[in-house]
Image (spheres, grey):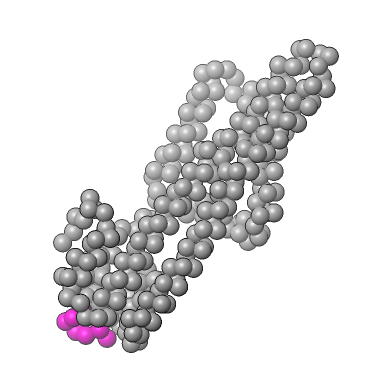
Amino acid sequence: MDIATIIGLLSGLFLMVWAILMGGKFSLFVDIPSVIIVIGGTVATMFIKNTMEEVFASLGIFMKSIMNKAKSPEEYVSQLTNLANLARKDGILSLEKVQVDDNFLQLAINLCVDGADPDFLREVLDKEVSYLNDRHGNWIAIYEGIGESAPAFGMIGTLIGLVQMLADMNDPSKIGPSMAVALITTFYGALIANLIALPIAVKLKAYSQKEQLIRQIVIDGMIGIQKGVNPRMLQISLKTAVPPVMRNFD
């Protein structure tokens, strides 16, 4: 579970509620038509930009951004070093009995055991990484799209409110409340974009970059094993992909 995402969301919401309560009544910031305009318009835009399957799947991606089990690059370096030691001791066919939780690493192991040459191995695994990048890019684009649409519909709601306010200019007592309601939609749009959608898009980018790093370590490691590189030399080579502060393993 990504505690940082949960802390960010909860603390952001808490600060917003606290600021509202310190300055006035919470009910002043609750307006159902504004909610419908911002959320309804944003969802409608999502369906226009994406397929229905992608829209519903994006909800699962949001949960994954919270429940994500962070993978550690250094753990993969250690795992690949152990595989290299096993292959050097008992031969590369000994890897046939190895079962791992990572599907990408398991695919690389199976290809090595099946006798794929290094060029073919890299070609297949590079394609997997390319397809992964495409999928991640689609999910990131969806949340970036929400970050663009929500403020836009907030502004649309504000314009609707201003038109209604101008229609009642003959009654000065209605101008203040109407202006407040008109601005609430902008508040909703900005809140959704800057507290939820855009931060989640940035977090997904970070996850994607880390996943790409791990997969590149797997590719380089398995090709090294296939070529019979000394396990210690292979470990030193793979460590270069890991940030120095994280190189806390033997």
Q: How many marks?
A: 0
Tell me the residue at 49%/59% (across/down). 136
Q: Is residue 113 left or right of residue 166?
A: left
Q: Which residues are magenta?
A: 86-94
Residue 91 inside the magenta-drawn segment? yes
The reply to whether residue 66 is in sight is: no
- Name above or below for residue 200 compared with residue 100: above
Image x and y of residue 177, in percent: 71, 19
Dominant secondary structure of the magenta stretch?
Answer: helix
Residue 19 belongs to the span the image colors magenta: no
What residue is shown at x 60% (from left), y 43% (from top)?
A: 148
**Residue 54 shows in the view:** yes
In the picture, measured across the screen, residue 70 lies left or right of residue 226, that is: right
- What residue lies at 54% left-to-right and 44% top-to-bottom? 197
Quick check: 96 left or right of 212? left
Q: Quadrant of residue 86?
A: bottom left
At horizontal 71% and vertical 33% (from top left) the residue drawn is: 157
